[in-house]
Image (tube, rainbow, N blue to C red):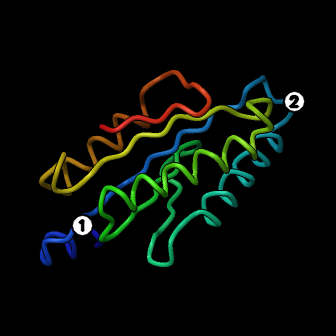
Amino acid sequence: MGFRRAAQTGEPLSLILVRLKPSHTPDSPPDISIALRDAARVLIRKLRTDDSLYLLSSSVFGVVLPNACRADMNRVVDRVTEGLIDASGDGNSFSFDIQVVNYPEQVSTAYEMERMADAFSLRKGSAAGKAEAA
């Protein structure tokens, strides 16, 4: 929906993908739930009014930033990164990867954006605080 609106109006759209990985073998499933809850709270607090947060898989969040210029997107990524580092207890609770996908700079269709999100979700490995632009 957001992509369709951006394409029709010619406005930019950014997708911030955040993958979480528990830093140690959790003692129980509630440990994973607590890490996800803490990360979701951080993401919600760091977003702008019009942004949307989605849980794309068991450990990947997607943040949709409508009408976000590169400077706005960078500010949100910086706030999210800082908040997740704090919430993870300097990596003791979980580590994370961040990837950003921008329309129209990097993708031209919703399908391309979805494929990049799928590839990010399936990719292995994680490093605390690692952010990359696609």
Secondary-structure class at tag 2: loop
26 and 71: which is toward the camera:
71
* 48 with respect to 86 (left or right): left
Per the rendering, the mark at residue 98 is none
Tell me where residue 118 appears, x and y as whole percent. 35, 40
Tell me where residue 93 appears, x and y as whole percent. 78, 34
Q: Crowding at label 2, few (<14), some or many (≥20) Cα neighbours within 10 Å?
A: few
Instruction: Report the Cα–Cα distance between label 2 and label 1.
Output: 40 Å
Q: Which residue is identified by label 2? A: 27
Q: Residue furthest front?
A: 71
- As displayed, is residue 47 above or below residue 81? below
- As displayed, is residue 45 above or below residue 103? below
Q: What kind of residue is marked 2?
A: Asp
1 and 72: which is toward the camera:
72
11 and 74: which is toward the camera:
74
* 72 with respect to 80 (left or right): left
Residue lying at 44% horizontally and 37% vertically, measured from the top left = 121
Q: How many marks on residues?
A: 2
* 4 with respect to 74 (left or right): left
Residue 88, by quadrant, is top right
Which numbered disc flags the more N-terminal residue, 2 or 1?
1
Q: Residue furthest right?
A: 27
Q: Which residue is identified by label 1? A: 3
Secondary-structure class at tag 1: helix
Tell me where residue 108 appears, x and y as whole percent. 12, 53
Residue lying at 65% horizontally and 66% vertically, measured from the top left = 45
User: Which marked residue is nearer to the observer: mark 2 or mark 1?
Assistant: 1
Q: What kind of residue is marked 1?
A: Phe
Q: Quadrant of the N terminus?
A: bottom left
Residue lying at 19% horizontally and 52% vertically, measured from the top left = 111
Tell me where residue 81 appears, x and y as whole percent. 58, 45
